[in-house]
Amino acid sequence: MADGRGVGVGDLDGDGRLDLVVANNNAPPSIYVNRLPPAGWVRLELLGRRSNRDAVGARVRLTIAGRTMTRWVEAGSGYAAQSAFPLHFGLGAARRLERLEIAWPSGLVEGLEGDALAARLSLGRAWRLEEGSLTPRDRRLAAVPASPAAGGGGH
Ligand SMILES: [Ca+2]
């Protein structure tokens, strides 16, 4: 039996299910690939401009089916491991995003809701969101699918 020390969480194969990597003492890492039945999800990779580039410290609130989930972009979130930066939201059977709010480390708070959000962010994929791209003037979101090479997963 391995002597596990640290754990990192991320979607290693980009299938929308979070996987685990455990750092072991004096042994190769253990990799646990999630094979649970697939469910709804969306992943957000934040790109800071005025804030730090990895958006460490950003807070994202996503509302679906009347419930709000909060995620933080963290660095050094565990001992002897680092989880992936992209924020993963498991959505279960929900089919529509209702509201998105991003509070960047720079102090900028921006977001979208309702039809404007649903039209720009579809479920079941990863999206890269750049700081300042949620413009209050036209309420449009300049989102592009994240590439797997950038650690954002996707299809
Ligand atoms: Ca996975």
Image (cartoon, grey):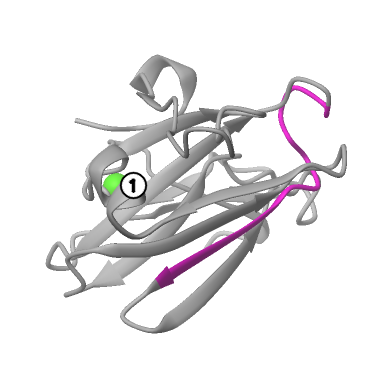
Q: Is residue 154 above or below residue 116?
A: above
Residue 9 or residue 79, whichever sits in front: 9
Q: Splitting the image into 4 quarters, where does residue 66 fall?
A: bottom left
- Residue sitting at x 37%, y 38%: 12
Q: Indicate left or right for 84 with 149 as reference.
A: right
Amino acid type, label 1: Ala
Q: Residue 87: horizontal and vertical position, in percent?
A: 52, 49
Q: Please provide percent x and percent y for residue 1.
A: 51, 65
Specify the quadrant of the image occupied by residue 90.
bottom left
Q: Is residue 21 visible?
A: no
* Callout count: 1
The residue carrying mark 1 is: 116
Q: Is residue 142 left or right of residue 135?
A: left
Please indicate whether residue 71 sits to the left or right of residue 50 in the image. Answer: left
Seen as rendered, the residue at the extreme left is 37
Q: Is residue 41 above or below residue 75?
A: below
> Does any portion of residue 121 appear in the rendered image?
yes
Horizontal side, residue 52 vs residue 19: left or right: right
Q: Residue at x 19, y 30 (%)?
A: 155
Give the overall secondary structure of the magenta segment.
loop
- Magenta includes 146? no
Give the magenta-colored segment's residue range.
51-63
Q: Residues within 10 Å of mark 1 (few under 14, many from 20)?
A: some
Identify the secondary structure beneath mark 1.
helix
Q: To which quarter of the image does residue 131 belong?
A: top right
Q: Is residue 56 magenta?
A: yes
Name the residue at 82% across, 26% down.
52
- The percent position of residue 37, horizontal first and vertical second, equals 12, 67
Residue 5 x, y percent position in the rendering: 71, 58
